[in-house]
Amino acid sequence: MPAFAAPWSPHHKPSHKEQMNMKVTKVMTRKLITGQPQEGLREAFFRMKQNRIRHLPVVDDEMNLLGLVTDRNLRRPDWVDEAPDIAHVYYLDDHMTLGDVMTTDVIAVHTYDHVDKAARIMHENRFGAVPVLNKEERLDGMLSAVDLLVVLEELLNEQRRLKKNK
């Protein structure tokens, strides 16, 4: 499913009950761009930029989630010494790896979770996206704020249609 597609078929408009019980799996992005812990930061940065993503899940060969690297980590990472002035520049290179800088205490949601639970977690933690794990605890997708905005837009459009038909 394209990242900006409606989470349901244009031929099947979900009922209000279906909308309220929507699972994360219906709206998450399944096309995953991932990194491995040994991958260099520079390489990862350019791959994120090329794919226009801000969150890079770090996984092992079996898709077990090991950590998460965000564009914010790479813009002003904790591992850079305090800048002497505002013009200070640091350079990303491949001497440091994703494993060196990734966040390992990642909060994730599951494919069987309801969208409202995921939205609450994202809102409370001020996350732009969260990894989505399957029942085997392996990475299955990513849920972004943009994915949730698509759902919100559809819900508001449906509400407008219902109000218009009254």
Image (tube, rainbow, N blue to C red):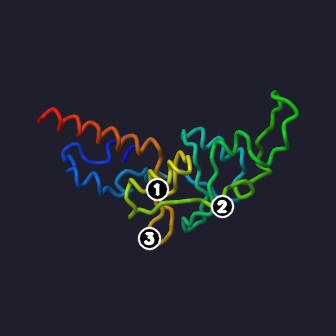
Query: Disc 3 marks which residue?
Result: 135
Of mark 2 and mark 1, the one earlier in the sequence is: 2
Q: Estimate the x, y position of residue 162 in percent, counting from the top left.
A: 17, 38
From the viewer's side, name the closer residue of 90 and 123: 123
Q: Estimate the x, y position of residue 83 in percent, counting from the top left.
A: 84, 36
Amino acid, disc 2: Thr
Of mark 3 and mark 1, the one earlier in the sequence is: 3
Amino acid, disc 3: Lys
Query: Disc 1 marks which residue?
Result: 141
Helix, strand or loop under label 2: loop
Q: Residues under labels 2 and 3: Cα distance? A: 20 Å
Q: Quadrant of residue 66?
A: bottom right
Question: Is residue 61 rendered to the left or right of residue 82?
Answer: left
Q: Quadrant of residue 152?
A: top left
Picture residue at 82% right of the left edge, 27% below the top: 87
Question: Is residue 34 rendered to the left or right of residue 91?
Answer: left
Helix, strand or loop under label 1: strand
Q: Nearer the viewer, mark 2 or mark 1?
A: 2
What label sits on residue 43 in the rendered view?
Answer: none
Q: Residues under labels 3 and 1: Cα distance? A: 12 Å
- Residue extending farthest to the top is 87
Q: Residues under labels 2 and 1: Cα distance? A: 17 Å
Query: Disc 2 marks which residue?
Result: 104
From the viewer's side, name the closer residue of 20 and 4: 20
Helix, strand or loop under label 3: loop
Q: Dot 2, how many residues are within 10 Å of its Cα: few (below 14), some (14-19), or many (20+)?
A: few
